[in-house]
Image (cartoon, rainbow, N blue to C red):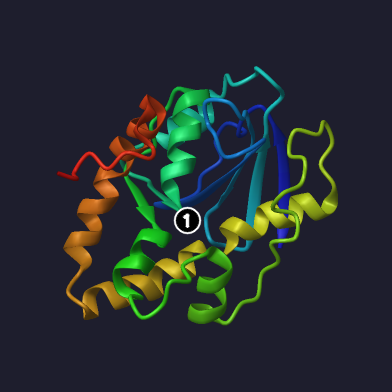
């Protein structure tokens, strides 16, 4: 595994192919309050690119172009949050998207364990650590442990997608999953608009 750390944006000319795994680290779980600190990306080749943001410095044209590129599928785990926080801070709405957490909930109905750690262990036999999950991502200098943790969150999403796609086809839920993925950016905007805990489809 090779980790590349960039400051403020991705370097020009960097390609992730047709599918890029993306995750974010923030100061908390409220995108309107807790600032975006880091975005991590991988093409599934074992390398990870980390983009660290200084407070208030979110002019990242190369990353924004990638997020909105219609030819590149953006692969998330719990994309609802990542899409919302990047839309709020970077001004770019990721599309098209795929979410391994949603896919898991649609086909792994025999369990309520849909976290990334659970999926990696159950579907591809990989154990990942979540020890740095609650660390200070706003620090000016990230520790090696933080970098490794951030990288691990995107290194396995391509493999998980392959296994989950097989299960979605097997259970005849691939079309349903695609419709859910298409709705994700709207779901993110509902969260940003104050409807995060309101079920607008309820009676």
User: For the point 69% across and 53% down, which residue is it?
Assistant: 133
Q: Quadrant of the C terminus?
A: top left
User: For the point 43% across and 38% down, which residue is it?
Assistant: 83
Above/below status of 84 relative to 156 = above
Residue 118 position in % (x across, y down): 54, 72
Image quadrant assignment for residue 193: top left
Asked whether, in this view, residue 190 is left or right of residue 62, the answer is left
Residue at far front of view: 203
Residue 23 position in % (x across, y down): 55, 47
**Nearest the camera: 192 or 4?**
192
Residue 29 position in % (x across, y down): 57, 40
Asked whether, in this view, residue 94 is left or right of residue 134, the answer is left
How many residues crowd mark 1 within 10 Å: few (<14), some (14–19), many (20+)? many
Above/below status of 8 relative to 161 = above
Residue 129 position in % (x across, y down): 70, 66
Q: Quadrant of the N terminus?
A: bottom right
User: For the point 29% across and 36% down, which residue is it?
Assistant: 186
Above/below status of 142 relative to 161 = above
User: For the point 39% across and 52% down, which residue is it?
Assistant: 18
Task: State the residue position of label 1.
Answer: 77
**Nearest the camera: 27 or 169?**
27
Count up the numbered dots: 1
**Nearest the camera: 66 or 77?**
77
Q: Secondary structure at mark 1?
A: loop
């Amino acid at each position: 595994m090779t980790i590349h750390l960039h400051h403020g944006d991705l370097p020009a000319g960097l390609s992730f192919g047709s599918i890029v795994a993306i995750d974010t680290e923030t100061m908390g779980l409220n995108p309107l309050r807790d600032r975006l600190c880091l975005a991590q990306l991988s093409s599934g080749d074992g390398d990870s690119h980390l983009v660290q943001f200084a407070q208030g410095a979110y002019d990242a044209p190369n990353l924004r172009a990638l997020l909105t590129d219609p030819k590149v599928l953006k692969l998330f785990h719990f994309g609802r949050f990542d899409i919302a926080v990047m839309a709020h801070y970077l001004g770019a709405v990721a599309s098209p998207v795929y979410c391994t957490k949603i896919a898991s909930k649609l086909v792994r109905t025999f369990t309520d364990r849909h976290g990334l750690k659970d999926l990696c262990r159950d579907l591809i036999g990989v154990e990942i650590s979540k020890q740095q999950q609650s660390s200070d991502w706003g620090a000016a200098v990230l520790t090696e442990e933080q970098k490794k943790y951030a990288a691990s969150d995107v290194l396995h999403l391509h493999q998980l997608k392959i296994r989950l796609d097989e299960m979605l086809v097997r259970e005849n839920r691939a079309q349903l999953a695609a419709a859910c993925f298409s709705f994700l950016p709207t779901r993110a905007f509902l969260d940003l608009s104050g409807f995060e805990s309101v079920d607008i489809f309820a009676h």
